[in-house]
Image: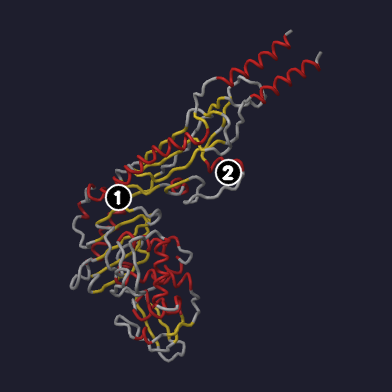
């Protein structure tokens, strides 16, 4: 009699479970809908805040007297803008252009290549090396001429060798700028001489210029070669025929102004004024400064004053702090789920965790997200784990949002929440929370199978 009661109880439990109204989130779609609704509001708020931050933020007293019309200070590791004065305004950038010319030549060229000067290259105005049409040089030597003495003709010889023509090389420069996210930069010349065509003016923004320098010294596969060239004090070479000798001296005075100065490039044209982009590394922190329209003759030293002020501000006000928080995510209840032992009526739970951690536990290959972590947006997780460069009054807020329950069926790796890191109102990192395992749903056929199993067991045991 007890055996029959057990079978009847199983059947009753199955029927009850199949008729209980849904009180849980069913599947991924509902979660995604809720997340998208919240995200849209947050994104709108962040966009609005970003658009007014520069106007609302109180300019530090020590930075109120900058000479440059456009100036930025960025974190060289993350690329985060730490200070901006008209940093998004597009302006001509003179010979600071040459950092892009140099890094492209390093990445696309062979340093032992022979580069031949054209008549067009020989026609370039001062500052120039003084090449003659048909004269041959080693590409590596021309890069020192380009970056130490800022020779305009060397830039054209390099551009024509790498890109086939100045126009072809400019296309490569603009392609690289787009890859780096520099949407307000447009290159026409490889040397930075003032120029305009049917598309626009040869120009950039202080923010874009700083991020191009970040790429050159931090991210490019040729960053070490770039630093070696731009840190060289003096360099001598000859043309390949050995008929003429040349000597170059580094005119980046910033290298001798502050401890930890890494690299930089000056620039000047009548339209651009004095420009500068430079980098400094001290105590594990890297800062990059970009200045546009920083005075005209006789104010050649304004750029050094502004650069030192911005670098000093960064050194005195920003330090690395640990912000990563390990998350303890509770198992999520699943309604109408099949238990491991196949007995209906018992509560079923599914484990959940950060997508990257679940993938690691399962030893499954996961396609990296846009920033190198599966299911992540914003900054890279490894950057948060090592620490974030923060100002004295800046705080990071962490929010973990996971649904309270699910309704079967549940797929493995189903998104059920997210962990978000905010710096002020700005979302700087987000990673999905996903289920570890799948949970199947109790249905009529499963209930029938359980009843038949119980019946078979009773028959077998007599």
Q: Which residue is mark 1?
A: 317
Residue 372 is left or right of residue 310, and the answer is: right
**Front of the two marks 2 and 1:** 2
How far apart are labels 2 and 1 at the CA level?
37 Å
Secondary structure at badge 1 equals helix
Q: Nearer the viewer, residue 199 or 439?
A: 199
Of marks 2 and 1, which one's residue comes earlier in the chain? 1
How many numbered marks, from 0 up? 2
Q: Residue at x 40, y 86 (%)?
A: 118
Residue 66 is left or right of residue 147, and the answer is: left
Q: Residue at x 54, y 26 (%)?
A: 333
Which quadrant of the view contains residue 209? Answer: bottom left
Percent across and percent down for residue 320 are 38, 48
Residue 353 is left or right of residue 191, and the answer is: right
**Considering the image in quadrants, where does the N terminus appear?**
top right
Q: Which residue is mark 2?
A: 360
Dot 2: within a 10 Å radius of its alpha carbon, few (fewer than 14), some, or many (20 or more) residues?
few
Q: Residue at x 63, y 20 (%)?
A: 344
Which quadrant of the view contains residue 184? Answer: bottom left
**Considering the image in quadrants, where does the C terminus appear?**
top right
């Amino acid at each position: 009699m007890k055996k029959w009661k057990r079978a009847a109880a199983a059947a009753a439990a199955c029927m009850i479970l199949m008729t209980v109204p849904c009180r849980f989130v069913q599947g991924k779609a509902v979660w995604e809908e809720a997340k998208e609704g919240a995200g849209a509001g947050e994104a709108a708020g962040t966009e609005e805040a970003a658009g007014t931050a520069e106007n609302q933020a109180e300019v530090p007293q020590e930075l109120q007297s900058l000479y440059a019309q456009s100036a930025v200070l960025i974190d060289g590791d993350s690329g985060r803008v730490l200070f901006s004065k008209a940093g998004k305004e597009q302006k001509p950038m003179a010979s600071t252009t040459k950092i892009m010319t140099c890094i492209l030549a390093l990445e696309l060229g062979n340093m032992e290549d022979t580069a031949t000067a054209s008549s067009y290259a020989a026609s370039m105005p001062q500052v120039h090396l003084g090449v003659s049409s048909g004269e041959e040089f080693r590409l590596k030597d021309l890069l020192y001429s380009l970056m130490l003495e800022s020779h305009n003709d060397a830039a054209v010889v390099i551009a024509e060798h790498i890109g086939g023509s100045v126009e072809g090389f400019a296309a490569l420069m603009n392609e690289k700028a787009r890859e780096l996210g520099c949407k307000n930069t447009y290159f026409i010349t490889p040397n930075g001489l003032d120029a305009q065509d049917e598309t626009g003016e040869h120009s950039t923004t202080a923010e874009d210029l700083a991020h191009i320098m970040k790429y050159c010294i931090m991210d490019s596969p040729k960053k070490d070669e770039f630093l070696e060239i731009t840190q060289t004090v003096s360099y001598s070479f000859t043309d390949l025929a050995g008929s003429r000798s040349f000597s170059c001296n580094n005119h980046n005075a910033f290298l001798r102004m502050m401890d930890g100065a890494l690299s930089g490039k000056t620039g000047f044209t009548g339209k651009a004024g004095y420009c500068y982009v430079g980098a400094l590394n001290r105590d594990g922190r890297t800062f990059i400064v970009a200045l546009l329209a920083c005075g005209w003759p006789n104010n050649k030293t304004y750029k050094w004053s502004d650069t030192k002020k911005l670098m000093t501000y960064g050194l005195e006000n920003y330090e690395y702090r640990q912000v990563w928080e390990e998350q303890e995510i509770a198992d999520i209840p699943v309604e109408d789920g099949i238990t491991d032992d196949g007995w209906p009526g018992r509560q079923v739970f599914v484990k959940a965790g950060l997508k990257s951690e679940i993938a690691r536990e399962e030893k499954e290959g996961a396609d990296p997200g846009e920033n190198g972590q599966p299911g992540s947006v914003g900054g890279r997780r490894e950057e948060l784990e090592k620490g974030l460069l923060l100002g004295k009054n800046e705080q990071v807020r962490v929010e973990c949002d996971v649904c309270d329950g699910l309704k079967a069926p549940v797929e493995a790796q189903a998104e059920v929440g997210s962990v978000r890191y905010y710096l002020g109102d700005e979302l700087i990192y987000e990673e999905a929370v996903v289920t570890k395992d799948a949970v199947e749903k109790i249905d009529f056929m499963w209930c029938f199978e359980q009843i038949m199993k119980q019946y078979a067991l009773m028959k077998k045991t007599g």
